[in-house]
Image: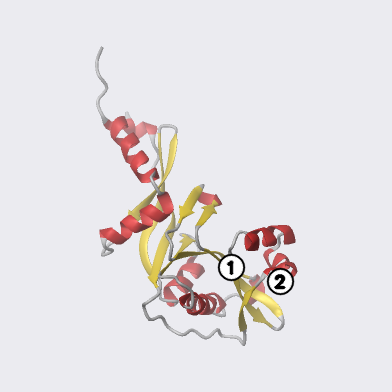
Amino acid sequence: MIASARDHPRQAGTVWVLDLDEATPAIAPLVEAALRRLGPESAPELAVAMATTQAEVSKRFDAGRSCYTAWVEGQIAAYGWVSFDEEFIGELSLHLRLLPGEAYIWDCATLPAFRRRRLFSALLAFMLRELRAEPLCRVWIGADLDNVASQRGIDRAGFHRVANLVIRRLLALRQVQVQSLPGVPESLVAEARRAFLGNRHGVWLATLSAAKSPKPVS
């Protein structure tokens, strides 16, 4: 039976979008902070803040990614990265592919000592101002469903919720689906599926249809 071959859907995260011709709120953090875009020369400081290697940070810059930061008392308190063509979302095993003019904000974090000071939403607002100066029209961002603080920060920065990312299993196939939210135009949900899933949505539907089809009796 099909019901025994798959588990219950599990919501993994939420997708937001913002068209850059929209107005967004100015957000001031609750602590004095300097907001900056960093370059490859800042790899040592970033590696410390991110608890990773300088080689990994340099690899991101070499691939054309941008990094934005909030500094408090002379140290990095929050950071976020932006990609402009494609990005691998490791926790979901997805290859996000962007159209020209799109950007994806990812791997954002506020260091523990500086949380609850609106640094994340202020950094997002700064990133949007910076990205408007580039030949871009749309920005995507996502967050884990259980990361309530990040979801609030993204909402505060003016992004619009589009869909939830849902993990389902059918037989041996594990699939991530983009599940629309109430009131969101289907055309926008389709754009989210295109960016986050590519042709995987069609593969899932074909597999689901085949699994549900009655088997011929020999």
Q: Residues within 10 Å of mark 2 (few under 14, many from 20)?
A: some
> Considering depth in this image, is 148 or 33 the residue closer to the camera?
33
Relative to residue 14, is residue 218 drawn left or right? left
Can you identify the residue that label 2 sits on? 42
- Which x, y percent locates residue 8? 38, 43
- Which x, y percent locates residue 30? 56, 85
- Which x, y percent locates residue 176? 42, 47
Which part of the image, by quadrant, shows the C terminus? top left
Please tell me in which quadrant of the rendered image residue 203 appears.
Answer: top left
Hey, what amino acid is under mark 2?
A: Ser
Q: Residue at x 55, y 84 (%)?
A: 29
Which part of the image, by quadrant, shows the N terminus? top left
Please tell me in which quadrant of the rendered image residue 36 appears.
Answer: bottom right
- Please tell me whether mark 2 sits on a helix, a strand or a loop: helix
- Which x, y percent locates residue 194? 37, 53
Hey, what amino acid is under mark 1?
A: Ser
Q: Residue at x 65, y 80 (%)?
A: 71
Asked whether residue 181 is in view, the answer is no
> Considering depth in this image, is 170 or 102 the residue closer to the camera?
102
> Considering depth in this image, is 79 or 191 the residue closer to the camera?
191
Can you identify the residue that label 1 sits on? 66
Q: Label 1, label 2: how many angstroms apart (C-alpha)?
A: 12 Å
Residue found at the far top of this picture: 218
Q: Residue at x 44, y 32 (%)?
A: 172
Relative to residue 181, is residue 122 drawn left or right? right
